[in-house]
Image (cartoon, helix red, strand yellow):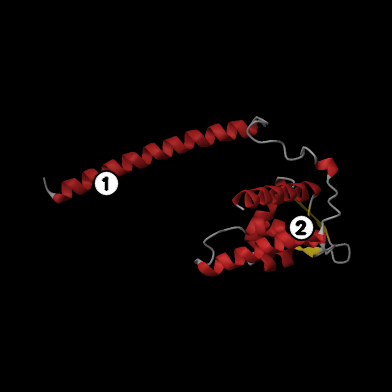
Amino acid sequence: MSSTRRGARNESRDQQELAGLSTTMMRHSRRIKRALDAEDDSVRPKLSVVPGLEADDPSEIAPSEIRKINAYIKAHRRRDLLFSPGMFGDSAWEMLLDLFIAKGETRQVTMDSVCLAVGVPASTAWRKFAALEEDGLVARYPDPDDRRKTMVEVTPVGVHRIRLWLSQLEDCTSMAG
């Protein structure tokens, strides 16, 4: 058998495998979408209902929480020095953490400053922000002094979820201890 025929058979087999994988992925995507559309709490809890949220006071972010988030950000920046730029796309997460710190420091933040802090183009930042906003983690409002600017902030739900993440992170590091 010639190498041309073997190459064609291998290519055909690869195309069949790819088609099969594509079909499987589509089937799983549809299942996930149906579960999310049904708002099945066992798959994804409603973000507007967060157990224990009432106990949180999002206006009072402790300095220790800010220090922990800053340490995490610093570790990520060190990671980024070791790997190719942009390899790990965490811009939405970085936005959320930046807004958490700003709230703790009682700073008002514009969307432009978030774009600069995260280092992504405005179009990417707005797209990521919209996803965070849809999940109830952040909010936007017009600047009362300059209607051309958009102010952004982390919501009480966002504060609560970051605190839960910090708690889980502490649990992980204490177990590794």
Amino acid type of disc 1? Glu
On residue 133, the disc is none
- In terms of image quadrants, where is residue 38? top right
Q: In which quarter of the image is the N terminus?
A: top left
Q: Which of marks 2 and 1 is nearer the N terminus?
A: 1
Nearest the viewer among 17 and 82 is 82
Q: Residue at x 68, y 68 (%)?
A: 116
Which residue, as the protein is rendered here, is positioned at the far front? 177
Q: Nearer the viewer, residue 5 or 95?
A: 95
Which of the two marks, 2 or 1, is nearer to us in this view? 2
Label 1 belongs to which residue?
Answer: 11
Q: Are marks 2 and 1 in contact (CB under 8 Å)?
A: no
34 versus 111 height, above or below: above
| Label 2 Cα neighbours within 10 Å, binned few <14 / some 14-19 / many ≥20 | some
In the rendered structure, the answer to whether residue 53 lies left or right of residue 82 reads right
Task: Report the residue that reaches farthest toward the left.
Answer: 1
User: Residue 123's spot in the image, x, y percent?
Assistant: 64, 61
Write down the residue under mark 2: 65
Assign a secondary structure to mark 1: helix
Query: Which of the 4 quarters of the picture holds residue 114?
Result: bottom right
Identify the residue at image location x=54%, y=32%: 31
